[in-house]
Amino acid sequence: MKLMDQNAHNTRRIAKNTLVLYVRMLVLMLVGLYTSRVVLSALGENDFGIYDVVGGVVAMFTIISGSLNSAISRFITFEMGKGDQSRMNKVYSTAVTIQLVIAAVVAIIAEPAGLWFIRNEMTIDPSRIPAAIWVLHFSLASFVINLMSVPQMASITAHEKMSAYAYIGTMEGLLRLAVAVLISRSSSDRLVLYSALMMVTVLMVRAAYGIYCRRSFPECRYRWVNDASLVKEMFSFAGWNFIGASSGVLRDQGGKILVNLFYGTAVNAARGVAMQLNGAVQGFVTNFMTAVNPQITKSYASGDQGYMYYLISKSSRMSYYLLFVLALPVLFNTGYILDIWLEDVPAHSALFVQLFLIFTLSESLSNPLITAQLATGNIRNYQLVVGGLQLLNIPVSYAFLKAGAAPEVTVMVAIAISQICFFARLFMLKGMIGLPVGDFLKKVYMNVLGTTALSLAVPFVIHGFLPDTIWGVIISVTLCVISAGLSVLTFGLSRGERHEISCWIKKALGK
């Protein structure tokens, strides 16, 4: 009975944290969309593309850091689930030391590698090479500063203090808006100024995380720890997770570089615009999973597998539906939305947006599975199989581009491989944690497919008859939201989940 009460309390906490993060996301989405418009207008298509590509080159080095970031988050959350305060401080201090070492390694490797790429391989106007080099310097500094935020962010998430996460994230969004306004009024080289001010923004956010964690969490006090077994354990976990982390980075950032090599910075600008719009929509699911992930890891650490299965299944469906209700009106009205959002819409932007949304919908089903896999710590075979499949993105995309395919093929390949990886994750987790695959496919995958097909019917039939005007778009968006919402409520959710939502609405209206 006590365990059931605790699980009910945890579920309410997830709902509360999700709501807090949603408020943050609404603010960030509105600010972010306006910021992107101002930045694209201020920089111009080619400079925006340069920033996107050079930033992608630097982000490639998350291959080195990404696997350790996942290890840090997993170990801090896992130890909190066990309730060992001393061990948590040891993990935190070890994580800070590791990040310092990794930051130095990345700086030493990335600087000469980035300079070589800009001067020898990047498709760019020669007169903009000096500016691109400054972008490299500032982007690398921002990357290193962000590395040092990982232990603090992991601590905030483990403690499920999402209000702090929301406040600091909102501050970051407002700072980015201020940067956009400043460069739009500057007469200097705006690309260089933008890169420098973005680095300052990252530094201020990093300071905010550090101050909050030091004041709020006793374990966030750095001390030198000489625990070889812990370092070995974390690096062993990170070593196998390196395959998955590198495959994800190569898929995303490598795709940018392939598009640049075959089509130039103008198409990179279109891809960058699409990723920003997709990121604004995807943020709603990211927030939901930020609230759920600690509970999945803690339930595994405490041995409560029943609650863990429940969270995995429910959060997979909810992640998809939260994204789908927002994505459907964008999918049907992409061109008009881009015209309203941007002054000059780069070619290829619309199809890139649609494909990225479909890719994100596919990935949303897998996010809880990834969290469960990391929670076990036993990830060698899993990463060899799933990470190996994801590594196919670059060679397959390259082959299609070499054969003359359109630049959007990089995202099409990612969608196909994402679905293959989803099924691979399911069957690997069956052996790792006893995940009931048949039950999951019935309650999640088939549920999602049926609800999606039902949601598409009305908008698909009516969309072609609507005028290409603002009123036509308003009607289309309204139909998409109503169709998706009613389909999810009627067929996507269980009777118990509909009852929960009804109770929440009544309670909110009562207050």
Image: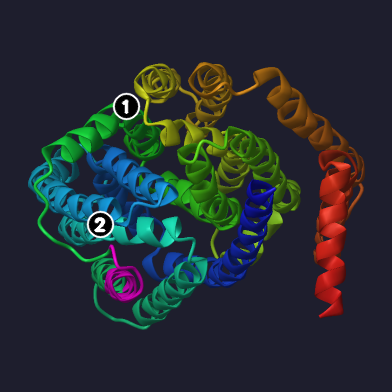
Q: Main SS of the magenta segment?
A: helix
Evaluate whether residue 444 shows in this view: yes
Q: Which residues are magenta?
A: 205-219
Residue 481 x %, y %: 82, 54
Q: Residue at x 38, y 19 (%)?
A: 388
Residue 56 x %, y %: 31, 46
What label does residue 89 carry, if any? 2
Q: Is residue 234 above or below residue 26?
A: above
What residue would you read off at disc 1?
A: 243
Q: Residue at x 27, y 66 (%)?
A: 195
Residue 257 x %, y %: 33, 38
Q: Is residue 236 magenta?
A: no
Q: Is residue 212 magenta?
A: yes
Evaluate whether residue 468 shows in this view: no
Q: Is residue 254 left or right of residue 508?
A: left
Nearer the observer, 62 or 466? 62
Label 2 close to label 1 by CB (< 8 Å): no
**Mark found first going from the N terminus, 2 or 1:** 2
Residue 5 x %, y %: 68, 53
What label does residue 90 carry, if any? none
